[in-house]
Amino acid sequence: MSKLKSPNSFSSLVEARYRDGQSTSRSLPNHLPAALETILTHKSFRSFLPKSLPAGTLEALLAAAQSGSTSSMLQTWDVIAIQDPAHKSAAAKLAGDQDFIREAPLFLVFCANLNRAANISRAHHQPALALANMDMFLMACIDAAIAAEALGLGICYVGAVRNHAQQMCELLNLPANTFALFGMAVGVEDTASYAEVKPRLPMGEVCHREVWSEENQEGNVKAFDAALGSFYFQQLKLGRKSWSEFVAANLASGEQDGRQNVKDVLYKQSFKLE
Ligand SMILES: Cc1cc2nc3c(=O)[nH]c(=O)nc-3n(C[C@H](O)[C@H](O)[C@H](O)COP(=O)(O)O)c2cc1C
């Protein structure tokens, strides 16, 4: 195993992620691969320098993305790489009109793709009855993954590609059995935007030992409200709701910026979800 690539210790990276003052009571390995440091120091970037990407970036990202596990070796996802400024701007408009998508030199839209399997089944005179199963769609969603940050680039995922799902299908010319799941803006990060990593729920809240337990949930959520509050305070993002207030407000309405229509669009795209 290689050593950490920066002077940060494993324990200080974990403490920065949880902000729970437990760094001395955690027993962590001394050495860990550089890839783990990349993951532990992840943050979303929503501000990109007006620089193009080094040659070969897209190919490197694709090779990394395709190296991930894939359910039953079916390879049921594809990606649309958008670089043309006018096309990117049209996609950004549908995806919550988020300017960082326009700023990023590359916008990747990850799609579930059961159409290749449908075409192959047809060519082999097989009925492809499994395509109607909800699990096939889940499989395609789960398989769509990437490792862009390992190249030292700034990225931000974009779930808002589902805000106007039907129009997004039309803009990207998506055939039946395909659907845009999420986007990823990729660019040279503007490190001036912010420096700290955003904290996460305590490990003990998301990791259940042997069986499910919600015993400490109230205390864990309270502790996380405080940790995220201190992060926002340091970032001078004042007057924000606590995390738990944000979660409750976020789910309060059935309207989700248009995403409540996702099921209808999936049906239109011939996903049966049985
Ligand atoms: C699938 C997915 C979709 C997301 N969609 C958006 C988005 O549309 N706009 C945005 O600004 N951030 C989006 N994010 C980024 C999250 O807001 C961000 O990961 C979260 O606030 C944690 O911050 P961090 O990534 O800096 O640690 C998305 C993240 C994921 C995983």
Image: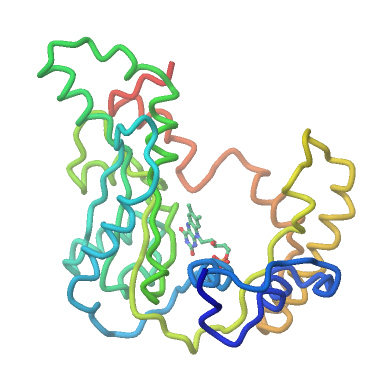
Give the percent coordinates (x, y) of residue 45.
46, 74
Q: Quadrant of residue 12?
A: bottom right
Q: Residue furthest front?
A: 1
Q: Quadrant of residue 29?
A: bottom right
Check the image and report above or below for 24 versus 125: below
Give the percent coordinates (x, y) of residue 34.
50, 72
Give the percent coordinates (x, y) of residue 159.
44, 52
- Asked whether, in this view, residue 81 is left or right of residue 97, the answer is left
Q: Tell me which residue sits at (53%, 71%) in the image.
A: 43
- Frontmost residue, 26 versus 94: 26
Q: Tell me which residue sits at (52%, 68%) in the image.
A: 1
Give the percent coordinates (x, y) of residue 38.
50, 71
Q: Quadrant of the C terminus?
A: top left
Q: Tell me which residue sits at (19%, 69%) in the image.
A: 85
Q: Quadrant of residue 10?
A: bottom right
Check the image and report above or below for 98 versus 216: below
